[in-house]
Image (cartoon, rainbow, N blue to C red):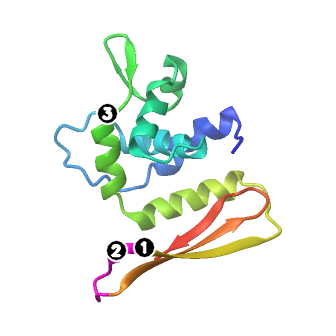
Amino acid sequence: MKITRHQMRSLPDFFKEINDPRRAQGRRHRIQTVLGIAAGAVLCGMRSYESIFDWAESLSQKSRAHFRCRYDKGRYVIPSLSIFRNILVRVDPNELDAAFNAWNKAYAQDDNSLAIDGKVMCNAIDESGRQTQIMSAVGHTTGICYAQKK
């Protein structure tokens, strides 16, 4: 997906209201920084924790400053792979979905039609003992996922 520099810089702003699932003690990176970088990486095609971290590592110091990374000893420092994984696994999916929808509303192109797709997740059993199914709505023109629900 092609996005502008302004759209990329604005990503952390959309994650300010998300509750941080980590303990207050020892937090070195703001949640909006971690989620902003992760969202930027996913928009650029990264699909795994490792690829998100690799993408973050490739950011210039100027880009790290735009994502509001922590400044330490004269350099902007990105979160570690374990921090990305920890936050992405534990963050509230509904809050994350609301933040993505707000970003889409602000910046997404108009789609004249949506593709609805469903998947059955292998070896994923929900609370009632049934296999987990996921439905997604994706724009034909932009390829943006507007909604994904269990």
> Does 66 sit above or below residue 8?
above
Examine the structure image and report whether residue 1 is included in the region drawn in magenta: no
Q: Which residues are magenta?
A: 121-129
Q: Are marks 2 and 1 in contact (CB under 8 Å)?
A: yes
The label nearer to you, 3 versus 1, is 1
The image quarter containing residue 77 is: top left
The residue that mark 3 highlights is 80
* Three-letter code, disc 1: Met
Q: Position of residue 87 (x, y in %)?
A: 32, 49
The image quarter containing residue 111 is: bottom right
The residue that mark 2 highlights is 124
Q: Is residue 81 left or right of residue 114?
A: left
Q: Are marks 2 and 3 in contact (CB under 8 Å)?
A: no
Mark 1, residues whose alpha carbon is within 10 Å: few (<14), some, or many (≥20)? Answer: few
* Three-letter code, disc 2: Ala
The disc at residue 37 is none
The residue that mark 1 highlights is 121
